[in-house]
Every structure is written in C-alpha cells, then in structure tokens.
Image (cartoon, coloured by chain):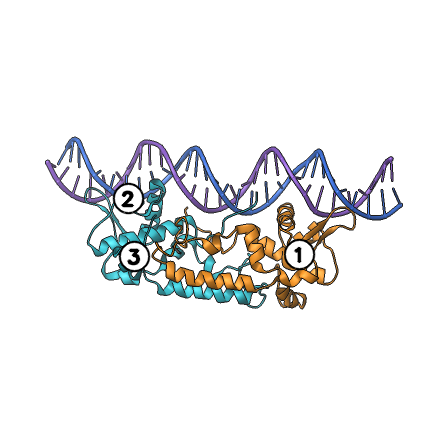
Chain colours: A cyan, B orange, C purple, D blue
Amino acid sequence: MLQKQGQMFSKACEYGIRASIYIAEQSQLDRKVGLKEVAESIDSPIAYTSKILQQLSRNKIINSEKGPGGGFSMDKQELDKVYLSTIVLAFDGEEIYKGCGLGLKQCNEKMPCPVHDQFKLIRDKLKTMLETTSVQSLTADFEKGLTFLKR
Amino acid sequence: MLQKQGQMFSKACEYGIRASIYIAEQSQLDRKVGLKEVAESIDSPIAYTSKILQQLSRNKIINSEKGPGGGFSMDKQELDKVYLSTIVLAFDGEEIYKGCGLGLKQCNEKMPCPVHDQFKLIRDKLKTMLETTSVQSLTADFEKGLTFLKR
DNA sequence: TTAATAACGGATAAATTTGTCCATTAATAT
DNA sequence: ATATTAATGGACAAATTTATCCGTTATTAA
Ligand code: FES
Ligand code: FES
C-alpha cells in the first residue's frame, strides 16, 4: 500500500514518443501506417493508441488520412524539426520543465524549495536533451535493428 | 482529455521528502513534532500525511512515538546518512533508476530503446544527485529561511 | 486504574490516468 | 450511388494514485 510509480513521462507520452519514432521511420520509407500496425509495432493497447495518435495528429506532429489507403504519416521534409520536447509538451505539458521537484505550486527562484538548485540542474539537462534530440535522429539505429520499440 | 502529469516523483514521495526535511530540521533543534504540525508546515493534507509518515517510519527513515509527548523525529547522529535516494526508494521504488524512459519493461543495454543513451545520461545524473544529497545538507538553508517547504 | 494524547491501520471515497467500445465521419474504389 | 476502408469522437470502464474517516493501540500522566 502507498507505493510505486516513478516514471519520467506519462504512459500516454511514452506511447506517443514510441509511435512517433515508428511512424517517422516508416515515413522515411514512404510508407503510411495504420492504427493496428502502429499498436503492434510498439506493443501498445490498440484502442488507447488510437487516442494517442489523435493527440499527435491534433498537435500537427503526425498527419492522418481517413479511408482506404489512408493512415498516419509524417512529412519527410519536416522530420528533422520534430523534437522529443514537442511530443512531451503535447502529452505532459510543461510541468516537467517548470514544475518544482518537491511539488510546490511553481518552481520559484526567489522562494526556492530546499532541493531547487540540485533539481534545476537535472531538469535543465533533461530539457536540453529533449529539445536537441530530434525524432529523426532516433530512426536510423531503429531501422538498422539496433534499437527497439518493443520487446 | 488525455493530458497532463509530468512530475519527477509521485505526490506521496514529494510529501515524504518535504516531511523528512521538516522533521530533520526540528530534530536538530531537539524537537519532536506531531502529525498536525508536519502537515501544516509542509502544506499537505493531514490524513494523507499520516500515511506518508507511517511509510517513512516503517522504512526507519524517521522514528515515531505514541502517546503524550510522542511524535516524529530523526536521530541527530544518523541524520547525515539519510539521502534523498533513501526516501525516493521508499515511495517510488527503483523504477526511476532502472526503468526505461519509453516504458519498455526494463531498461536493457543489450536491446535498448531509441532514447536509451540520452535517457541513461540524465537518469544517472539524477541517481547520483539523489544518492549524494543528504536530507541534513538541506536543512541549514531551510532553517535560515532561505528555502521553503510551502508557499 | 483511568483519562488523555497521539500514532496506527483498515476501509472507503475521490480524482486521475489508462484503457475499451462503438457509432459516426471522411475518403476511396467499384 | 454503394460498399469498403480507416480514422474520429464520445461515453464508459478499469486501474492506480491521492485522500479521507474512524475505531484501535500504545504511551504517558494524573
Ligand atoms: S522551487 Fe522546487 S525545484 Fe525550484
Ligand atoms: S532501454 Fe529505454 S532507457 Fe534503457
């Protein structure tokens, strides 16, 4: 009782990142992908994945087309402009950037919590990492089979 | 719909750290503190805080004494041996250290997810920070009124 | 030994997150 | 036009986390 959790991003966000990487890779091969294929490829519950893809679509991170021959895709040209930060923002908001590590309403330099300095250091590194890591940069190794979206 | 979250630690863990810092500081002044005082001092719901303190007590992070004159405290001698990692472990487990950033069952060097390298870097820094920051080291500035456990 | 104090523990409730179901809408092909 | 395909959106359900309530237990003091 009273235990567990402790993941950096929400489940939705995790799925969102995984889906984006898969769709990006397939888009580089000029393939549109359907909901079912995405869900299977990233090992996520299909109905929930539908919501995830809608959210990505609403945030213009992926394109979606209805009907036969439709599916999800990303613009090859703009692929290098989608960063992990874009996706994290769409799902988890900016709490992870602005939030206080000890749960005070807002992180506040003027009235910092006791772990502010230490926490800010980590948080800023995370922020930089997310803002400099493009989805595209992650697809190469995935395509080579060096990294995995499910196990 | 389908939004929000994004905090590093669970609420329980946040309360746990805040409570520990408060109790540590008061223990340095040789004061035992009661549930009500703790809850007010860290601005947390009192009944839930009760559970939090029980959890800390069960994990030997704080002492608790029943009855009149009782309350919660920490051993002044051992105060420098309690690290943030101790508390995080008690509430959120080791997921935050061992977990995969994209939610794969386990982080696995041999079959890494696409963000493994980047994520591991951050995660290890967080781990080091938590393992080297003692609760005691945080009390000094709090006592001086330079840091805050509520606002 | 009794009354008062204060933490403990179990049951339960509220809120949030995760997940499902299904009818609707849009697009394509016949 | 019609049937088929595939995403969309709304309502709902399960699971988890956060939070409350209240009787019990242990401790102290009178
Ligand atoms: S105030 Fe807590 S992290 Fe900045
Ligand atoms: S496998 Fe994903 S973080 Fe290591």
Could you tell me how far apart the alpha carbons at marks 1 and 2 are, in whole angstroms? 50 Å
Q: Position of residue B117 (x, y in %)?
A: 38, 61
Which element carries disc 2, helix, strand or loop?
A: helix
Residue depicted at x 33% and y 43%: A50
Q: Which residue is mark 3?
A: A146
Q: Is label 1 on the same chain as label 2?
A: no
Q: Which residue is mark 1?
A: B41
User: Which of these two is toward me, A125 or B57?
Assistant: B57
Q: Is label 3 on the same chain as label 2?
A: yes
Contact (Cβ within 8 Å) of mark 1 with mark 2? no
Is ligand 2 closer than 8 angstroms to the Cβ of mark 2? no
Q: Position of residue A149 (x, y in %)?
A: 33, 51
Q: Earlier in the sequence, mark 3 or mark 2?
A: 2
Name the chain letter of the residue that bears numbered label 1.
B
Give residue A93's quadrant in the image: bottom left
Nearer to us: label 3 or label 1: 3
Residue type at mark 3 is Leu
Q: Which residue is mark 2?
A: A35
Residue, far front: B110
Q: Residues within 10 Å of mark 2 (few under 14, many from 20)?
A: some
Q: Is residue A104 visible?
A: no
Residue type at mark 1 is Ser
Residue C1 sits above or below residue B13 on the image: above
Could you tell me how far apart the alpha carbons at marks 3 and 2 are, in whole angstroms? 24 Å
Residue type at mark 2 is Leu
